[in-house]
Image: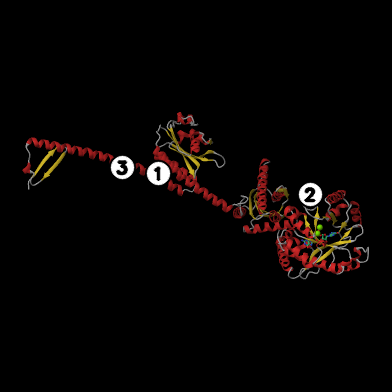
Amino acid sequence: MKESEYRIPGASVTVHGSHFADQIPSPGGLKAQVDELERRLQLEHIARVDAEAVAKRGLNDLYESQRKLDLLQRVATAANQSGSVDEALRFAIHDICQFTGWDIGHAWRRAAEGEHLVPTGIWWARDPESVKRFMDLSAEMSLAIGEGLPGQVLADGAAHWIVDLSCDPNFLRAPVAERCGLRSAFAFPVKAGTEVAAVIEFFASEHLHRDDALLQLFDQIGTQLGRVIERKRAEEKLVYEALHDPLTGLPNRALFTQSTRMALRRCRRDPDSLFGILFLDLDGFKLVNDGLGHAAGDQLLIECGERLRSTLVEAERFAATVGRQWPRWVLARLGGDEFTILLESMESLEQANEIAGELHKALEAPYVFDAQEVFVGSSIGIAHGGPHYLDVTDIMRDADLAMYEAKAEGRGRTAIFDQAMHHRADVRLQLENDLRRAVSREQFLLEYQPIVRLSDTALLGFEALLRWRRDDQAAPLQPDDFIHVAEETGMIVPIGNWVLQEACAMMAKWQHGIGNRTPAIKMSVNISPKQFLQPTFLAQVRSALDRSGIEPGTLQLEITEGVAVMDPRRTAAQLEMLRRWGVRISIDDFGTGYSSLAYLHKLPFDTLKIDRAFVVQMDGDPAMQVIVKAVLDIAAFLEREVIVEGVETEEERRQLIALGCTAGQGFYFGRPMDVGTVERLLERRRRPRDPIADAA
Ligand code: C2E
Ligand code: MG
Ligand code: MG
């Protein structure tokens, strides 16, 4: 094998070949061939250099994209891991400045209320000293939509780039920026959904040309940061919902318990600090809820919550103006119509009472539903905290007990917890249990009090009054001892039904037996609000009438003003139906509740019963006589009858007759009496002009 070597400038080629030497051309031909080879090699060289340049450029681009991708990834990761939106913004501003080499970055946040941007105070600056004035100026600003660079981004929802700050008429901070050596700026939006939640701005000390690729990258970063805001908002919403009452927006039981637990802890560390809990329950809320419907009930709770809140806020504000120590407070709705207030760092124990007084006042003012006024008060129990309370539930229970005592004393009261309440609570619990069994044990009985014509004491009828022969107690209990418990626990419904059936049955006996020889007398039966509002109430009355077979006109149902006020339309419809059957209706205890004369005339009723309270005071107080006369005038105008309650003396009878009263009831004519006494009375009544008082 033969080997030859040709040297060409810039290249070295070794030609191998077994028969190449045999084909060696002539010297002229050889040169042409070498030139050709050289030319081809040079072309190859150029092509290779070009290819290398392309490859290098590609690599650079790749590197740039990789850097951008890294930045995006870092921001995304930091955003996901950050504990707060501020932390994510701080990280992003720092990293973007590192990436771009720009000198400062700053974030604006959209104000919670209103359409403007406020500074967050989140900055990064390469040399903070040199841009301090610019930062100070920005910190004082608030930008409306379209105002300044950030406002522009807020308006458009898109990134903006300013090459020369001194030439942009909308760049409000230009003079200070110039003095701080800032030349170019760009800003981009952070979007939560479609809403611009924040704007981040950057400044450079050189004039830098708009870089669309960069703006695109920041658009993506804005989206990443926006996700943090969305996530934070969702988290905050969840936490808020877990700790607040959706109806009133007030703290709920969980948050209240948490706050009270902390107060207890603080109290253990500092036993001199005074704290207390107010437990507030609305009076008569159930009547609104049952009578006017749940929507009205909800509305009432919202308004009560708002009244309580604004009362506390205003009292606190006032205390501040007079330099008075005011407790820290937390107002919560526990559920239903129960509200609680935690008071911490009180000036004195008396302050809790004072605040309770303010809250009572706030809730007492009338509420208006469908142009109708409703009155709802509250009962408040106070428990004063102290290191002796080991658990939140203990102090809550005591405040609750005190509230029950307040309620038992009547509407609109406040009671402060004391140890004796525990005992009374036990007693009440026993009463509730006994009451529950009383119907089946047949422990109830009725007494009957005569209702008479004032002029000659002729018998007009009886009012059936409930008594309870409780276990082995000698004297039966009077309604005042148990009827409120029956009412609160709902047991009044079966008890009231029993009264209705029993009174009607008794009336039938008297009508068919003794009474049919004398003019018809009427039987008055008290109906509790709860009983009246039962959907089955009309059916109960119907059944009492049918089973007893009495003349419906001899049954007179006594309802209180409270029921009449609750839901006038429904009440009117029910009463209308009862009257269509022939049953008569009385408004009992007239003048003691919150009656509205405005719609009284629209109510279908037959008789007004003037409460005993007016008669008792009539003697010493001439104003009472005027009031009684006014009620008589109203009744006369409305063509309704009047029965006056609680006549105890001949003098009262005389005065009432002089005022124009015709019918009455009271100890003067006869106390409530048992069946035997009534029957003897009816027997003797056959003799004309026999005064009832004699028989009783
Ligand atoms: P009320 O319906 O106003 O009944 C009249 C009350 O006044 C009765 O008290 C009666 O004994 C008392 N009274 C009558 N005349 C005089 C008087 O001259 N002087 C004084 N000091 N008192 C007089 P009682 O029986 O204790 O009943 C109290 C209340 O309990 C009743 O007031 C009524 O609201 C309620 N009640 C009684 N029975 C029932 C019932 O069966 N169902 C319901 N829901 N409530 C009832
Ligand atoms: Mg009555
Ligand atoms: Mg009465």
Instruction: Determine if residue 496 is in view.
Output: no
The image quadrant of residue 224 is: top left
Q: Who comes first in sequence, dot 3 or dot 2? A: 3
Q: Which residue is mark 1?
A: 71
Q: Is residue 123 above or below residue 510?
A: above
Q: Who comes first in sequence, dot 2 or dot 1? A: 1
The tally of labels here is 3
Q: Are marks 3 and 2 in contact (CB under 8 Å)?
A: no
Q: Which residue is mark 2?
A: 597
Q: Residue 341: x percent and y percent?
A: 65, 51
Residue at the spot x=73%, y=53% of the render? 569
Mark 2 Cα-neighbour bin, 10 Å: few <14, some 14–19, many ≥20: few
Residue at the spot x=50%, y=41% of the render? 198
Three-letter residue code for mark 2? Leu
- State the quadrant of the C terminus: bottom right
Q: Residue 625: x percent and y percent?
A: 87, 50
How many angstroms separate mark 2 from mark 1 (CA)?
76 Å
Q: Who comes first in sequence, dot 1 or dot 3? A: 3
Image quarter for ligand 1? bottom right
Q: Residue 67: x percent and y percent?
A: 37, 43
Mark 1 secondary-structure assignment: helix
How many angstroms separate mark 1 from mark 3 (CA)?
18 Å
Q: Is mark 1 within 8 Å of ligand 1?
A: no
Q: Nearer the viewer, residue 176 or 537?
A: 537
